[in-house]
Image: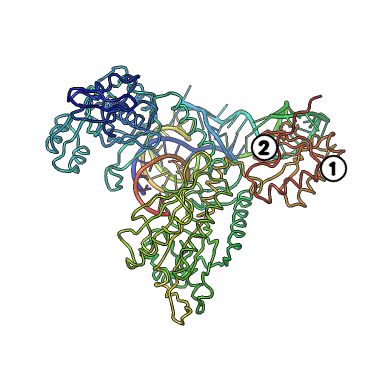
Amino acid sequence: MITITIPDVGDVQVPAGVTAAEALADVKGVRKAVAAKVDGVVVDLSRPVTSDATVEAVMPGTPEALEVLRHTTAHVMAQAVARHFGMENVEFAIGPVIEDGFYYDFELPRPLTDEDLPAIETLMTTIKRENLPITRHEAEDRDDALAMVRADRAKSRFKEELIAGFPEGEGVSFYRQGEFMDLCRGPHLPTTSKLGFSKLLSVAGAYWRGDEKREQLQRLYATAFFDKKDLKALIHRRAEAEKRDHRKLGQRLELFRIVPEAPGFPFWLPNGTVIFNHLVEYMREKIQERHYQEIRTPHIMIDDLWKRSGHFDHFHENMYFTEIEDRSFAVKPMNCPGAAITFSQGLRSYRELPLRLAEFGLCHRFERSGTLHGLTRVRSFVQDDAHIYCAPDQLQSEILGLVALCREVYEEIGFGEIEMFLATRPDDRAGTEEMWDHAEDELREALAKIGADYSVNEGDGAFYGPKIDFKVQDAIGRKHQLCTIQVDFAMAEKFDLEYMADDGTRQRPVVVHRAIFGSIERFVGVLIEHYAGNFPLWLAPEQVAVLPVSEDRHADAAGNALQELRQRGFRAHVDWSNNKLGKKIREATLKKIPYLLVIGDREAGHGTAAVRRRDGTDCGNLELGELIALLCEERDTRRLTPILDAAPKETE
RNA sequence: GCUGCCGUAGCUCAGUGGUAGAGCACCUCCUUGGUAAGGAGGAGGUCAUGGGUUCAAGUCCCAUCGGCAGCUCCA
């Protein structure tokens, strides 16, 4: 007999070797359990328990249960694909669980099309109804496992390759339901009837083991949940994300365009340029407060410079080159060399440090056509870049200042949670161990000083120094990496940068590269989706629309309102069309203009306007001067939420 | 770059190998109106580009360019 400890229930004595399910037999609701946890490890319910252990049921609703469900659903999807094409025509690769679902990679006689999906889904439902028991089979070692896959099917080179990579001398497990067997660590649901609600999402190509030199496989993405509600919620979330897609909104709101004549090089339309410029202006304020100096450096410089900076060696594939009077030039992919040259004009004194040189620099990088994506992955973009040249003992306070700046900006923009990552020394690196120790310590200490929560990405630093990366969460919970703060010991050497220290010796400055927005292009792309196109007043391309009820009777009042708004610097217009009011409201609302001022008989004589927000809220009738003062406050304080609330309902 | 899908009016999209279509937007006229679409008329096309098959190609085939999803890359 062994002793099983069941949390919240107590200890029970059972014969050694009973299954986890049997051990849990008395637990309330155990019939719904999808797996068991033995001493904290999730296993099949059918797994025997051979010695004293803590055993608990893994119930639907827990993350572990969902993972088991999705993993099993992946197997069932593979089985359905096998039935759809015939087992002998399919070669199976891998089928892991990912965030929000799972996928499975196959080699198939022909590519999957959207028409295959419903057929595969139907087969999955059939397999669920067949209520096939899912059983675990163990191979002694790798040879045994190889024999098992070869006996099971004609083509198994991917599975064989996987097995060959397993550690020697360890067992290998397989799972079988019905005619389908798959190499798998498990655990799985006990039978296919326990499957929840699943949906096939998309088809894509993927390389075997992510290597573009290897076989290209067909990848089928899908998801599964226990509760139909959750599946619907995910589908809704995907639809919501699609509605916010910055490429669609960018087109509809006339913010930017990317045309075939310049693939990957965005055109900023007037509306988008307003946003672009205001973000730059905002960042200028921020860096002026922090005593940065702004510079501008050339877009095209001779090859030798890029060879000296190391870009030619490390970044050549992503650079554009051109020839001028038989000399080879490169278009800048980064701003660092220009800043370094700027720094090196004249001998610097320690009194000038930290010297913070900012540049809203336009960079060009060659990106492969398949990687381009709206504004978030482009071939030309403007970075809100800066290079800080400081003495080693100033490094930490500079880092502190940058982390604070980042947090301040992201908070003012309205992002949710901010995650920080410390990326430490990679295997391939420059500089001495002391330098790395020092730099990493400085970063760690800075993060500790502000009490920041952060994760460490070991070995993820740049070859010249460690960095802090920021990830922000947008309004619908997606994460974007924007800001990066990088410490660089190599650049000062490469460009022979020096300053005169207080003891009269020449010293190398430490260089910090950083961008807060990252690139303005990507930042605007993220912002469009974050705000769903509803930009806060200070950024909105059009801030106020004046809508006369009758375009001739109320023309004077509308014109006056417009003039006053424009005098106070608002981007405003009057809808002079002869449409009815309802239509004018619809059009202005679709343009996501924050405030609509309706002016009719009731307002014209009193110098007021009936104010409506783009979300449909009626803010009531306000005197024009008072209204404009409030709007100024909303704009000038860069409020994220409207300053005007719903007017109280008037009862007559 | 790779695999698959796609490319028709400014936008969103229909279109059976046999005369090029709709809605919105645009222009003109009527309508002067009260919180998300008033009415009528008009204009707008090298069906991405180049080849091929066919009596006949928007439609079938090939190539190129561009877009989308994913992979890879980047961060």
- Given residues A274 and B39, the one toward you in this image is A274
Task: Identify residue type, mark 2.
Answer: Arg
Image mark 1: chain: A
Total marks in image = 2
Q: Considering the numbered disc 2 on the image, is that residue within a helix, a strand or a loop? A: loop
Label number found at residue A614 = 2
- The front one of A286 and A528 is A286
Q: Quadrant of the C terminus of chain A?
A: top right
Q: Looking at the figure, which quarter contains the N terminus of chain A? A: top left
**Dot 1, crowdedness within 10 Å: few (<14), some or many (≥20)?**
few
Q: Against B14, is A277 above or below?
A: below
Q: Are marks 2 and 1 on the same chain?
A: yes
Q: Position of residue A622 (x, y in %)?
A: 79, 39
Answer with mark 2 or mark 1, whichever residue precedes in sequence: 1
- Residue A556 has which mark? 1
Q: Quadrant of residue A35?
A: top left
Instruction: Label 1: state its secondary structure.
Output: helix
Q: Residue furthest right?
A: A605
Residue placed at 36% from the left, 55% from the top? Answer: A460
**Which class describes the residues within 10 Å of circle 2: few (<14), some (14-19), or many (20+)?**
many
Residue A48 locus on image (x, y percent)? 20, 26
- Distance from disc 2 to disc 1, alpha carbons, whole Å, reads 24 Å
- Reply above or below: A634 against A79: below
Percent coordinates x, y for residue A224 in the rendering: 38, 28
Q: Nearer the viewer, residue A458 or A366?
A: A458
Identify the residue at image location x=36%, y=37%.
A98
Q: Is residue B58 left or right of residue A637?
A: left
Looking at the rendered structure, the kind of residue marked 1 is Asp
Relative image position of residue A562 (x, y in whole percent):
78, 46
